[in-house]
Image (cartoon, helix red, strand yellow):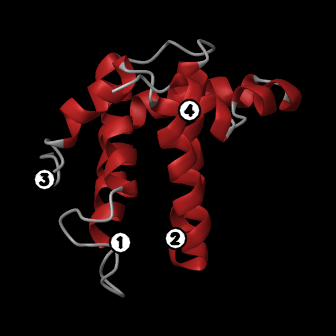
Amino acid sequence: MKAPWNFARYLPLAQRFLSGGRLPGLLLAVARKSAKQGERFAGFKEDLRLLQGLCLAWWRGEYRAVSTQAVVAVVAALLYFVTPLDALPDWLLGVGLIDDLAVLAWVLRTWSDELTAFRRWREAQTPARLELIERLPSDEHSVLQAPSS
């Protein structure tokens, strides 16, 4: 299946986020935006948590049984989600999140085998360990991790 329109331009940006240590800041932005969306995004909240959980486990070095291409695609989808001016600007009431949902759905479908394996690994963790692994970094920590420009 072909990637959604305009998604490919987010892949190099995702690679720069990963190599530059900027993933924690992105994950905080995703958490803030999904919390703001409330009920409008209810159906995808669990999927977003799964993608965030994968990124957090990968970032902390707890889960590396995932391809680099899958991690880059997930990060690119999360970047697309937090970017307000994408194919359909988020401020367009009623339609602004449709393209975000389409990109997330495409990543979930395209990388479903890798995400299923991560979901199994996640379910095998104790609740206390999973809480530590998937705890969002603090704002202060993410600023410390960001590369200087």
| Residue at 79% over, 33% down | 131
**Which of the marked residues, 4 or 3, is nearer the chain's N terminus?**
3
Is label 2 in contact with label 1 (beta carbons under 8 Å)? yes
Q: Decide: is 84 above or below 81.
A: below
Q: Cα distance, mark 3 to mark 1?
A: 15 Å
Residue 98 occupies quadrant: bottom left
The amino acid marked with disc number 1 is Leu
Mark 3 is surrounded, within 10 Å at the Cα level, by few (under 14), some (14 to 19) or many (20 or more) other residues, namely: few
Q: Secondary structure at mark 1?
A: loop
Q: Given the image, on which type of amino acid does mark 4 rest? A: Val
Q: Position of residue 59 (x, y in %)?
A: 54, 20
Q: Nearer the viewer, residue 141 or 107?
A: 141
Cα gap from disc 2 to disc 1, whole angstroms: 9 Å
Which numbered disc flags the more N-terminal residue, 3 or 2?
3
Q: Which residue is mark 4?
A: 143
Question: Which residue was labeled with disc 1?
Answer: 97
Q: Is residue 50 above or below residue 59?
A: below
Say what secondary structure mark 2 lies in: helix
Q: Nearer the viewer, mark 1 or mark 4?
A: 4
Amino acid, disc 2: Phe
Mark closest to the chain's N terminus, 2 or 1: 2
The residue carrying mark 3 is: 6
Q: CA distance from mark 1 to mark 4?
A: 28 Å
Q: Amino acid at mark 3?
A: Asn
Question: Going 22% across and 41% down the picture, which residue do you hit?
Answer: 10
Mark 2 vs mark 4: which is more N-terminal?
2
Mark positioned earlier in the residue sequence (1 or 4): 1
